[in-house]
Image (cartoon, rainbow, N blue to C red):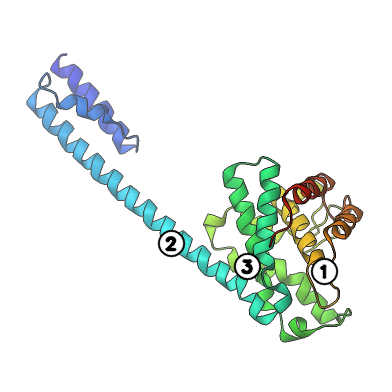
Amino acid sequence: MTPLTGQKRLIRLIKEVSAGHYSDDILALTGPEFPPEIQEIAEAVGMMMVKIEAREYHLEQLFEKIKSNTLNTVTAVAGALGARDAYSEGHGERVGIYAERLARRLELTTEEVERIRIAGVLHDIGKIGFSDQVFTNEETRVNEDMLLEIRSHPQWGYDILKNLEFLGPALEYVYGHHERLDGQGYPRGLSGPEIPLGARIIAVADCFDAITTNRPYQDGKTPQQAFAILNEQAGDALDPVLVDAFIDEIESGGMAE
């Protein structure tokens, strides 16, 4: 190989490294068949590449740690709802489990399943803004102010989480879990395919857990009674395909503990 050919190859590889395309090709230019000046530059670039890769790996690890700590904190905040409302204790965790199981049954990607699980756990975090009046109310009737609070919690949840960019689409799932197929949901009145699949999955899981656990206004119902209610809401509020798949999942895998 001529010195000129070696120089051209060196320049090309340096450009690739500077563009972030790292490979071991640069190390091939450190062999004795190349002029000393090319060997020296190639070795220097190779060392620089190794240091950059190590630094990038360290930053990635640091980001993952920050993301994990932040998510744990936010999840703890969501879980703290149980301290204000005994009826909601464990609700987020169970909805996360149900939503994850349904997402797996639908054969969604591993990444999407995890996003849906996280959104299920966090879906009611906006309720942290509820007044004591809402939390202590044990009547079936609610006044207009209380109803406004209740219908605002998806928006409040969105506002709490919106700066956590690593949540990605999971944020929209939290935002949209009370939308209905017929457009009569809240807070945006989305309908049909406008509602993200993740939000529709959480809606089914959320509804089932609410029906089967004790609430101030009702005793928890059996799974079969809950299935009947889900089927009644299918097509208007809930996605009928998801309802069918969810019922199959619970019948085969049982309820979350």
Categorize mark 1 by other alpha carbons within 10 Å: few (<14), some (14-19), many (20+).
Answer: some
Q: Find numbered disc 2 in the image and state the secondary structure of the residue it sits on.
A: helix
Identify residue for label 2.
Answer: 66
According to the picture, the residue beneath numbered tag 1 turns out to be 220
Residue 178 at x, y percent in the picture: 77, 61
User: Most extreme residue toward the left, as rendered?
Assistant: 36
| Image depth: mark 2 or mark 1 in front | 1
Tag in front: 1 or 3: 1
How far apart are the two marked residues, 2 and 1, measured between alpha carbons? 39 Å
Mark identifier at residue 133: none
- Which residue, given by chain and number where applicable, does mark 3 sit on? 159
Q: Is residue 134 above or below residue 34?
A: below
Residue type indicated by callout 3: Asp
Q: What's the distance in space between the residues labelled 3 and 2, CA to CA?
A: 20 Å
Nearer-N-terminus badge (2/1) = 2
- Element type at mark 1: loop
Quadrant of image for the C terminus: bottom right
* Left or right for 184, reference 93: right
Crowding at dot 2, Cα within 10 Å, few <14 / some 14-19 / many 20+, comes out as: few
Image position of 243 with respect to 68: above or below: above
Q: Nearer the viewer, residue 231 or 127?
A: 231
In terms of depth relative to the viewer, which is nearer, 110 or 26?
110
Measure the alpha-carbon separation of dots 1 and 3: 31 Å
Instruction: Please name the amino acid that badge 2 sits on.
Output: Ile
Is there a contact, CB below 8 Å, between mark 3 and mark 2? no
Residue at 82% in and 65% down: 211
The foreground one among 221 and 191 is: 221
Amino acid of disc 1: Gly
